[in-house]
Each structure stands twice: as C-alpha cells, then as structure tokens.
Amino acid sequence: MTPPRAVVVVGESVAGTTAARNLRALGHSGPITIVGAEAQGACSRPPLSKGVLKGGGSDSTLGYDLGGLDVDVLRSPATDLDTDHKLVRTENGRVLGYDALIVATGADARRIAAPGQEGEVVLRTLDDARLLRARLDTAASALVVGAGFLGMEVVSACVARGIPVTVVDVDPPLRRVLGPFLSDAITARAAEHGVRVRTTPGRVTLTGDPVDGVRLPDGTVHRADLVVSCCGDVPNTGWLAGTGLAGPLGIGIDPRCATAVPGVFAAGDVTCLRTDAGVLQPRRPFWSNAVAQGNVAAASVLGLDPAGPPLDDYFWTEVLGLSIKVVGPLPLPGPPTRVEGDLSSGSALLTWHREGARSTVVAYGMRKPVPKLRLMAAAAL
C-alpha cells in the first residue's frame, strides 16, 4: 500500500498521543494533526484518582509531552466526519483533510442524574479531579455510587482524609471484575477502615437539586455532603453519527485496529474488538489497552505489521493503601488455584490457572515487578 501523506488523530488521549509517537518512530514523515477536546490539553487519567485527589503537586505534570514530534495540535472538539471526502470538522470551524484517520476520542463519564438535575460529581478529566479535590477539602461525609476500580479509589481518598464514606453498588466491591474471592478480601479491608458498603438489587437515583444523596429502589435515602458518581463510562462517538463507524458498544475494530471504513482506524477506550465472526466484544477501557492499540493503529496506518496485539491485559489499582496489580484475563472465576503469602495481612501472590490459556496473576499488596508477573501469567500455557 502507498503510505499515507496526512494523518489526523482525533483524540488527545493516551491512545492518540501514543499513536502519534509511534507513527514518527516507525518513520512517518508526513503531517500529523492531533485534534483534542480539552482547551488546556488532555492528561494522563490514572493519576487523577491515585494522585491528584491527594494534593495539587502533580497537576502540572500530567499532560502528554509531544515535544520533538513535529505534530500540529488543534484543541477544539471534532463535530463531524465525512468519510467519503476524508474530512474532519471541528467545533471552531476548521476542516481537516486526511489520508488516514485514527479515532482515539476515549469515553465520557456515565452520568445518572435526571435531566436538569444539578450538582452531579464525576471523575474523568483534570477539571473533574480538581473540583472533587476541592469538595473533599470541605466534606464531612461522602457517598460514592459504584464500587468498581474508580469508585474504590475515590473511597480510598475519602478514608485517607478521614471522611466517613459509604459506597453503594449492586455488587460488593470489585466483585464483577476480580471475582468473589478478592472481593470478599477487599470488602473486609473496607470494613476495617470504617467504610460502609451498601448493596442494592437495582439502580439508584440521585436526590436533591443540587445533588445531596441517593435513593435506593426500596425508597431508602442516604444523604451526604459529597456524592460522587463512579458508574462507568460511555464511548465518545456522538460526532460520528451517520458514518456507520460506531454503535452502542463503541467503534468495532479488528486486530489491526482497522474499522469497517477503509482508511479509518481506532484505538483506546472508544473501541471494542471485533471477533473473526464479526461479534463485538465488550469494551476494555484500561490504560494498558489504550497504549497497545495506539501502537497497533500507528503500524497499521503505515501498512506495517504491529509489534504486538491490540490488547494488554495488565491493570493496577490502589485500594485503601493496598496496591493490586493484575496480569491476565478478567473477570476472575471462583477461588485462586494457588496462593502465596497472607491475604489477610495484605501481602499475597495469587494465581488463577486456565487450562490451555494464559493464567491470571494478582499481586495483592505484594511487591512484584510487572515483567515478572507477565512471565508468570504466560508460563502456564
């Protein structure tokens, strides 16, 4: 194939900036334009809940460094895509032509407030994190809706500040992804730190205007000074209406990060992998996958073989002062096949063996370098 001259990357995300870096690393000398939606520039998201909520010292270090890449950065949201004429339009009226396009617009926080209801707090952008940090400075009580990774990191920030906190979800903490064994251990740890865990059989609604609490399906109302919605995210695809690129699950991609439209590739939280049978798998909005897909998309744009797969099943979080590193497929079924160390003391290495497939290895508070965890997960093949 003829290498593309002009490449447009829509999304100043980790996937988008990784793609730009790899395009240059692989020898692309043509123009690259990155279209970002945030006026101050996008930033790395993992530190928002792990670092920014603890203090303001890291705020200025979270942006993506594009120095030396010779890329044009246009910070105005994309509003329309014309795939027939290969044009991207932006909110400020710019029209950008491309030979190849990489869509890396990520996802937005899922909101549960009623239409017109004010005061819902979410955590997705640096501005969100700064607002939440300011609210934590004055809150005497907090309530977190959602006991997934993000929700439990916000819970941890509350505990670190001595703020009484309740977390509400249909399942116990992290049950859907880490399975019952680790969920039970994390729930017990939460209780030791005074966290109140409330499970409910259905969706909750936010009360007040501005928001001041949640109402459970049975009518029970819990109120707090601060209510934070950590209810997942939704792929940012509204600007792609009419293109056939996106559906409710996001943008379907093949192992080369190619979409159903020639010349258009996608990477990061906005994507879902399409199987050989054409079935779309659930999105996997992890930082490591965004990096992997940014690299794959860049190679594919240039007609080169990617150096690795579009998925990297590594994830880490920090819950109530405990680091949890996971390498391998999720969710985790039942109890682990092997346990080293002491789970109750917060220092254990756990393995879930899958016959004929990669194992999943979890360092639960135990210091283990990620490369070693990867080797352990692959060793059981």
Image (cartoon, rainbow, N blue to C red):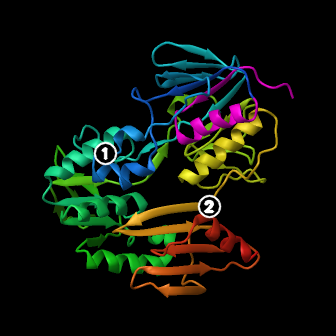
Residue 178 at least partly seen: yes
From the viewer's side, name the closer residue of 56 and 228: 56
* Residue at x 55%, y 46% (from the top left corner): 269
Residue, disc 1: 57
Residue 313 circle label: 2
From the viewer's side, name the closer residue of 320 and 37: 320
From the viewer's side, name the closer residue of 117 and 177: 177
Q: Earlier along the polypeptide chain: callout 1 or callout 2?
A: 1
* Residue at x 36%, y 63% (from the top left corner): 152
Residue 244 at least partly seen: no
Let me know if residue 130 is in the magenta part. no
- Mark 1–mark 2 Cα distance, whole angstroms, equals 30 Å
Let me know if residue 20 is in the magenta part. yes
User: Where residue 235 sits: x, y (%)?
Assistant: 51, 43
In the picture, measured across the screen, residue 262 lies left or right of residue 92, that is right
**85 lies above or below 194:** above
- From the image, which quarter does the C terminus lie in? bottom right
* Residue at x 46%, y 19% (from the top left corner): 91
Quadrant in the picture for residue 2 = top right
User: Where residue 271 sits: x, y (%)?
Assistant: 60, 45
Q: Amino acid at mark 1?
A: Gly
**216 lies above or below 276:** below
Identity of the residue furthest to the front in this view: 68
Mark 1 falls on what kind of element?
loop
Query: Magenta segment range?
Result: 1-27
